[in-house]
Amino acid sequence: MINKKFKFIIKVIVFIILFLPYCAFSNSNNCENDKKICDKLNQVVGIKTPIMVASGTLINDKLIVTNRHVVEDHEQFIIRFNNGEIKKAFPLPHNFPADLAILTLSKETAISNQFIQSSEINGMIRVIAFDQGRKSNRIYDKGKIISFADVKKFPQSRIHTDAKSLPGNSGGAVVDDTGNLIGILASGDGNINEIVPISLVNDVIKNTSETHKENFFKTGKNIRLCADNLEEAQYIQKNLNDKIANNIDNYCWNSKNKQLIDQAGQTFGRLGDLKKAKKFLEMSVKLDPNSPNSLISLAITYHIMRDLEKERPIILKLLKLIPENPQVLRLGVQVAGVLKDKKMSENVLNLMTKYNKEALPLAKKFIENAFKSNQ
C-alpha cells in the first residue's frame, strides 16, 4: 500500500515538472484569445549549432528559414520542434545578401515552387521564437513598426520595431495581429529589434544553388570569425589588441553582413577608434538607411568627432523615426545650438515638450545661450 502511494506521488511530481511550465507558458500566450497567432508556435523550431542556440521558422514540412549569421559555416544543425521531436538539418548554399539562410531536413538541394506569399501588415507585430530559458517556443509582447526601407533597393535592410525579444530568438517568426508571417527576427539592442522582411525569402530561394557552395561557406567563415572577435572585444574596456582589431576590420568587413558591420562600428566607437567606427557605421547606414540603431551610433561618432554638419541630417531623420528617444533629443538640442539652426531648435524643443518635459528647462537654457553668443 505504501509502495503504491509512493509511486502515485512520484507520478504527480513528474507530471508537475514536465507540464506545469508548459501550462504557465500557454496561459501567458493567451492562446484562447489569439488562436491564429498561437497556431504559429508549431511553425517555430529551436536550432542548436556548435556555437549558439537560435530559432528557425518552418516554411513547409522540409524547409526552415533562419538567419545567415546563425548558419555561419556549419554544415549541419540539430533542430528541436515544438512537440519535442529532434532532427538534423542542412544548409542550402545561396548568394543573396540578406541575412537569411534555408535549412533542409533532407540532403536534397533542389527547391521548386516553394515561394513565400507576403501580405500587408495588419496592426501590431510580435515575435514567436525558441526561448532558451523555458526551452520551448514563446510568444513575446507585441510592438509597433518604427521604420523600414525599400528592400528592392536595399536587400539588407530590415523592418525596425519595439516588439520584444530575447537573445537566442534570431531566426524566429514575426507575425502581425492576424497571424500573417511578415518576417524573420534578425537582431536587436533590447529596445529596437530588427526583422528581415519575409518577401526576401523568395530571393534567397531563387538564388539557392550548389554552385554557390564554396563562396557560401567562405562568407560563413568570415561571419563566424567576425562574431568570435567581436565577442572577445566585448570584455575589453580600452586598448584593443592589434590582432583582434585587425581581425574585426578584416572578417567583419568581408562578412558582408549588415548586423556584424554595425556591431563592428559600435565596437570601434566604444574603444575610441573613431576612424574605423565611421567606416563601418557609414556602410551600415548605406545598407539600411532607416535603421535607428545604426543612425544613432553614426550620429554619436560624428558628434565625438565634432563633425556636426554631417550629424545634423542624421539627427533630423531620427527625430522623425524615434522622436521620443531621449538621447536623440539631447543630441538634437546640442547640434541645433552649436550650428545656430533656429528651425531645428524649435522642432527639438517642441518634441521635448511632448516626450521629455523634465529636460525641457535645461534644453531651453542651452538654446538661448547658444543664440545669444551669436549676437
Image: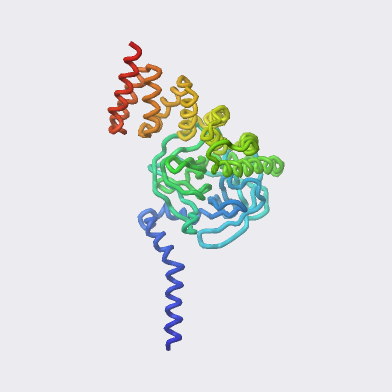
Q: What is the x, y in percent for residue 189?
A: 46, 41
How many numbered badges does the structure rendering display?
0
Foreground residue, 121 or 50?
Answer: 50
User: 89 or 355, which lies in front?
Assistant: 355
Q: Locate residue 154, reporting x and y percent.
A: 54, 31
Depicted 35 relative to depicted 202: above or below = below
Question: For the view shown, which residue lies furthest in the front direction?
Answer: 239
Q: State the residue at coordinates (67%, 52%).
A: 108
Residue 96 in sight? no
Left or right: 329 in relation to 204: left
Image quadrant containing the N terminus: bottom left
Q: How is the image coloured?
A: rainbow
Looking at this view, name the residue that lies furthest to the top: 375
In screen coordinates, is 271 left or right of 345?
A: right
Residue 95 in sight here = yes
Please, is residue 205 above or below residue 324 in the view?
Answer: below
Q: Position of residue 284 (x, y in %)?
A: 54, 32
Whole-percent x, y for residue 173 in the image: 49, 48
**Residue beneath the point at 46% across and 53% down:** 40
Q: Would you place residue 60 above or below residue 260 in this image?
A: below
Quadrant for residue 325, please give it.
top left
Residue 13, quarter of picture: bottom left
Q: Residue at x 48, y 42 (%)?
A: 188
Residue at 40% x, 55% y is 35
